[in-house]
Image (cartoon, rainbow, N blue to C red):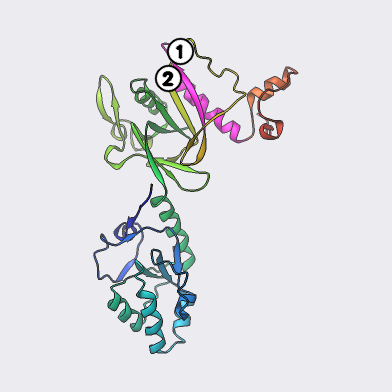
């Protein structure tokens, strides 16, 4: 999860930037910080807190200030700034850097690209893109599907039926993100996004048949590139001596990258329609997020004390 970086070539492929000066191969230039530096106090020599790992942005305000400086002052300011070796300078609103900036960029081999979009738009788009690309990540065995809008991570022992269940869910109109392995990224303090490793994307291994391509068999509408992980579903072979959750008064959680995710265990045995059960689990999880708990309503209706979390935690905020 440490030492993550993204190549400048990947950013240039994602955004429509015009290359103004590119002394190095963008494939070799790496960005490892998801924050952005906007030229401000740095132009007057305040470089104490300048982070050279960040992308450098020059917008209309900075360009206007530079126009008030003499050629010598511009060279001195940009020489000090570029000597710290930022990965790239991006100008916005179609601004072409003045000759002094280009001279200092050539002196220190700093790449410069230009965008016609407003500065605030470029910053927000870049930060969002870098947050995903540089997010802490782990790879876990399992399958990830979008079921009724909920991202479900299917886990369980090999051979329990995860891939077969995924195929049945695809036939019922749901979407596959990954089978067998899921790359999980922490994009915020509360959100996890899962995707498939590129080399196995859209492929499913079905015992007895072999490898199938879900996108070609079920169509482009049956697959997605990524999905937020809303719940983890553990499939396990039915154990007669184990007590499974029958009332839903308690909720289990599993921690992934420091984030707690709802976790349920569904026992597998002959005669159970796992696809339908998982569909119901997805819809029930959505109801819980919206504030509705069927178990609590049943206990209240029967005049019994609800044994689960306090009413403040499980208050029904809407009716169904």
What residue span does the magenta drawing correspond to? Answer: 262-290
Counting from the top left corner in percent of width and height, residue 291 is at 64, 34
Counting from the top left corner in percent of width and height, residue 106 is at 28, 77
Q: Is 165 in the magenta?
A: no
Q: Is residue 307 visible?
A: yes
Counting from the top left corner in percent of width and height, residue 74 is at 40, 84
- Residue receiving disc 2: 236
Observer-nearest of 107 and 121:
107
Q: Looking at the image, is 274 positioned above or below residue 76? A: above
Identify the residue at horizontal 38%, vertical 89% (top origin): 72
Q: Pointers 1 and 2 in contact (CB under 8 A)? A: yes
Q: Is residue 118 visible?
A: no
Q: CA distance from mark 1 to mark 2?
A: 8 Å
Observer-nearest of 34 and 48:
48
- The quadrant holding residue 57 is bottom left
Identify the residue at horizontal 41%, vertical 87% (top origin): 73
Q: Looking at the image, is 121 positioned above or below residue 139? A: below
Q: Secondary structure at mark 2?
A: strand
Q: Secondary structure at mark 1?
A: loop
Q: Looking at the image, is 125 positioned above or below residue 19? A: above
- The quadrant holding residue 211 is top left
Q: Which mark is residue 274?
A: none
Label 1 Cα crowd, 10 Å radius (few <14 / some 14-19 / many 20+): few
Observer-nearest of 259 and 223:
259
- The quadrant holding residue 302 is top right
In the picture, the quarter occupied by the C terminus is: top right
Q: Is 282 in the magenta?
A: yes
Identify the residue at horizontal 67%, vertical 34% (top origin): 313
Total labels drawn: 2
Q: 204 left or right of 265?
A: left
Counting from the top left corner in percent of width and height, residue 119 is at 46, 68
- Residue receiving disc 1: 239
């Amino acid at each position: 999860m440490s030492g993550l970086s993204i190549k400048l070539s990947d950013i240039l492929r994602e955004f429509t930037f015009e290359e103004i000066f590119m002394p190095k191969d963008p494939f070799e230039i790496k960005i490892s910080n998801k924050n952005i530096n906007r030229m401000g106090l740095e132009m007057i020599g305040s470089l104490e807190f300048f982070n050279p790992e960040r992308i450098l942005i020059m917008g209309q305000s900075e360009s206007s200030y530079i126009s008030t400086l003499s050629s010598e002052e511009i060279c001195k300011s940009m020489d000090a700034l570029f000597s710290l070796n930022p990965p790239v300078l991006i100008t916005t609103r179609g601004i072409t850097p003045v000759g002094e900036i280009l001279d200092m960029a050539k002196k220190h081999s700093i790449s410069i690209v230009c965008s016609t979009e407003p500065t605030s738009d470029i910053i927000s788009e870049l930060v969002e893109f870098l947050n995903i690309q540089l997010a802490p990540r782990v790879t876990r065995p399992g399958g990830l599907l979008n079921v009724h809008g909920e991202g479900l991570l299917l886990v369980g022992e090999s051979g329990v039926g995860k891939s077969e269940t995924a195929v049945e869910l695809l036939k019922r109109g749901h979407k596959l993100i990954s089978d067998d392995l899921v790359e999980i990224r922490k994009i915020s303090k509360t959100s996890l996004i899962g995707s498939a490793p590129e080399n196995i994307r859209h492929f499913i291994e079905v015992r007895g048949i072999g490898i199938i391509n879900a996108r070609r068999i079920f169509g482009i509408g049956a697959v997605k590139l990524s999905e937020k992980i809303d719940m983890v579903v553990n499939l396990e072979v039915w154990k007669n001596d184990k007590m499974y959750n029958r009332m839903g008064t308690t909720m289990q959680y599993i921690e992934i990258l420091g984030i707690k995710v709802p976790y349920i265990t569904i026992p597998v045995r002959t005669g159970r329609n796992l696809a339908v059960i998982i569909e119901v689990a997805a819809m029930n999880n959505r109801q819980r997020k919206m504030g509705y708990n069927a178990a609590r309503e049943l206990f209240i209706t029967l005049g019994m004390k609800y044994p689960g979390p306090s009413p403040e935690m499980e208050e029904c905020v809407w009716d169904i």
